[in-house]
Image: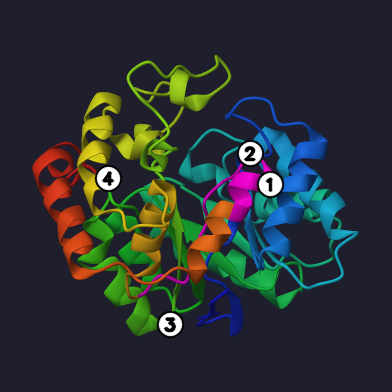
Amino acid sequence: MEYRRFGRIGRDVSVVGLGAWQLGADWGEVSTDDALATLGAAVDAGATFIDTADVYGDGRSEQVIGEFLRKQPEPIMVATKMGRRVPQEHANYTAANFKAWTDRSRANLGVDRLDLVQLHCPPTAVFQDDQIFDALDALVDNGAIAAYGVSVETVEQALIAIARPHVASVQIIFNAFRLKPLDQVLPAAQAAGVGIIARVPLASGLLSGRYDANTTFGADDHRNYNRHGEAFDVGETFSGVDFATGLRAVERLRAYVPAGMTMAQFALRWVIDQPGVTVVIPGARGPEQARGNLATAELPALPPEALAGVRETYDELIRPAVHDRW
């Protein structure tokens, strides 16, 4: 496993972590036993970073992680998120709510201090409000959280956050179907010492190469009910790419996958290879998926022709639909 430094936190984390949205809700049913087994497999394979949120299963993901941590002797960095359990209005981002939300997450996770708390894709006006970041600074000062960051939908939001002096991390959708962060976000984060958490690295599974035109998803899976942004930002589902277009792009990318590497590992390796990425957080619904994702860190960097193939596929098939939206 490769470990990279979280600049403003001063802590090393595995370059591949685990995204725990699946362990809470919105991806079909995952039992507690399966969730614990997935966490165990990821950590055994070298993961030292787990990302969750208070809204994932309305706290279930945090609670399962908390149960796992009580039996886990090795230090694991857990990043959670807050703010999506209320209407997405600027007025709801207050010091009082921050205290209540972080207290709830601390109880769910069974810890006195949260390692990293991220504002969970709030409205753009939140990123521009000095008082909100003063309130986050106060949480650090009183010991409730060790550090804070933001999860964003757009490049604009990311750049505003990176300019803030105490923002430790920016979590952003970044994958072979979302190349826009390469232009400004990753260089700016590197210069400022801000960690980049690359989320949705497999484009909600599209880039795993396991789906075809006949694939269906359950009623409780956001890949069914949020394809047009019915529940939350459509960019969170398949990275905002039309399913059929995404399948076409994946078929083109298969030609560039090196021998001994799965399509999913190819997609994750592409993210890891980009300068400025601190940790990539693929989700997993079972131990086998977790182990396969973590094994990507041991694979060689992609050759230049593969990188060029990703760029060409993006420019021809994906860019027109997504580049100017986020």
Range of the magenta residues?
276-291
- Judging by the rendered image, the residue that carries numbered circle 3 is 193
Residues marked 3 and 2 touching at CB (< 8 Å): no
Quote the CA–CA distance across marks 2 and 1: 7 Å
* 194 sits to left or right of 57: left
- Judging by the rendered image, the residue that carries numbered circle 4 is 254
- Give the numbered dot on residue 287: 1
Residues marked 2 and 4 touching at CB (< 8 Å): no
The crowd level at tag 2 (other Cα within 10 Å; few <14, some 14-19, many 20+) is many
- Judging by the rendered image, the residue that carries numbered circle 2 is 285
| The stretch drawn in magenta includes residue 286 | yes
The amino acid pointed to by label 4 is Arg
- Give the mark toward the camera: 1 or 3: 1
Residue lying at 58% horizontally and 80% vertically, measured from the top left: 9
The crowd level at tag 4 (other Cα within 10 Å; few <14, some 14-19, many 20+) is some
| Percent x, y of residue 305 | 17, 64
Quote the CA–CA distance across marks 3 and 2: 32 Å
In the image, 114 versus 1, the foreground residue is 1
Quote the CA–CA distance across marks 2 and 4: 23 Å
Q: Secondary structure at mark 3?
A: loop
Residue lying at 57% horizontally and 40% vertically, measured from the top left: 84
- Give the mark toward the camera: 3 or 4: 4
| Percent x, y of residue 169 | 49, 68
Residues marked 1 and 3 touching at CB (< 8 Å): no
The amino acid pointed to by label 1 is Pro
Task: Tell me the quarter of the picture where residue 218 sits.
Answer: top right
| Mark closer to the chain start, 4 or 1 | 4
The amino acid pointed to by label 3 is Gly
Q: Secondary structure at mark 2?
A: loop
